[in-house]
Image (cartoon, rainbow, N blue to C red):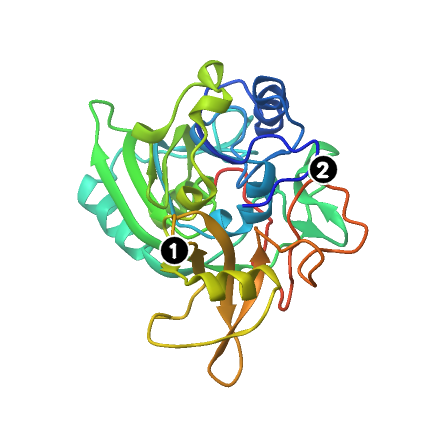
Amino acid sequence: MSRRRNEGPDGLVVVDKEAGWTSHDVVAKSRGLLGTRKVGHSGTLDPDATGILLLGVGRVTRLLRFLTALPKTYTCDIVLGSETNTLDDSGEVVATYDMSTVTFEQVEGAAVGLTGDIMQVPPMVSAVKVDGRRLHELAREGIEVERAARPVTVYRFTVTATAEPHIISAEVECSSGTYVRTLAADLGTALGGGAHLRDLRRTAIGSFRLTDARPLAQVSPECLLSPADALRDYPSITVTEAERIDIGHGKVLPRDDRFEGSGPWVMLNESGALLAVYAAHRNDTVKPDVVVAPIEGSAAVLPNDTTDSPAEVSHSAPPSSVQSIDG
């Protein structure tokens, strides 16, 4: 992989975020710990939530949108009988309900009804934009606006009874963009009352688990996963030396039997280092989406590129980078 002047480390850090830190705080602190300003995250966790936060470093910041698209898993408690203005326990209680007669079997049935492909209204405390403004900015001003429901997928919504009859323990595996706090509130509504979320913890993003994570205080350049490891959830293809050169020039390649599924595909050299990410193209070809190891002087290197990062070849609209605060 070619190097450029003033280039810092490249890779992925899996952080186990503590409560009380914003995702931006974690990124800012990591810049000092890693010795580079080129750090970003793949999906926000609100300050009260804990768990996995994926940090892209150096060239891997160009790859974060692929990590954003991965499914996510959470654990939480759902408090039956009260609604808050933030849908979690950081907000003010705005309504209470007597749900003492609700049985656990009813809770299980309601959870089943919220599993699969569903439509979900983003909460006001989210990063979704309406008329050019983020909802959480409007919420801080006391403004509530109409929000269109969006399709999301809940792959698994497992509920467990606790010693407290009004507290339900839950584990949720869901698509990117799913709001777990909204899921908790919708569960309460489905049971004829209301509910809110507490103790949210993100336990997985794709194949990245808490066993891969470390506290922020332990982050250092030595803990970086390689750019290739960062994309381990996607199918990979090891290319020949001739193909490596073509990839470095950002060329379209023929799609042969190695390109299974719908992509994207991670392109590796014979040593296992990441070269690029390719996407399906017309007429049985594949095209470069992101070129991580461009050949100097090639079309894959942006003119006047002084960012110390690889060129990104955008041939189609990328997946949305808008993330929920808790999903």
- Residue 235 visible? The answer is yes
Q: Which residue is mark 2?
A: 137
Which amino acid lies under the numbered mark 2 shown in the image of this protein? Glu
- Which dot, 2 or 1, sits closer to the camera? 1
For the residue pair 10 and 209, the one nearer the viewer reads as 10
Q: Is residue 153 above or below residue 4?
A: below
Q: Position of residue 313 (x, y in %)?
A: 64, 61
- Residue 318 visible? The answer is no
Q: Position of residue 191 (x, y in %)?
A: 33, 46
How many C-alpha atoms fall within 10 Å of the one at disc 2: few (<14), some, or many (≥20)? some
Alpha carbons under labels 2 and 1: distance apart: 35 Å
Number of numbered callouts drawn = 2
Q: Position of residue 252 (x, y in %)?
A: 56, 73
**Image quadrant in which you'd find residue 78:** top left
Which amino acid lies under the numbered mark 1 shown in the image of this protein? Tyr
Q: Which residue is mark 1?
A: 234
| Left or right for 100, reference 149 | left
Q: Residue at x 57, y 18 (%)?
A: 33
**Image quadrant in which you'd find residue 265:** bottom left
Identity of the residue furthest to the right in this view: 304
For the N terminus, the quadrant is top right
**Secondary structure under badge 1?**
loop
| Left or right for 139, reference 252 | right
**Secondary structure under badge 2?**
helix
| Left or right for 286, reference 234 | right
- Which of the two discs, 2 and 1, labels the residue nearer the N terminus? 2
Q: Which mark is residue 68?
A: none
For the residue pair 230 and 121, the one nearer the viewer reads as 230
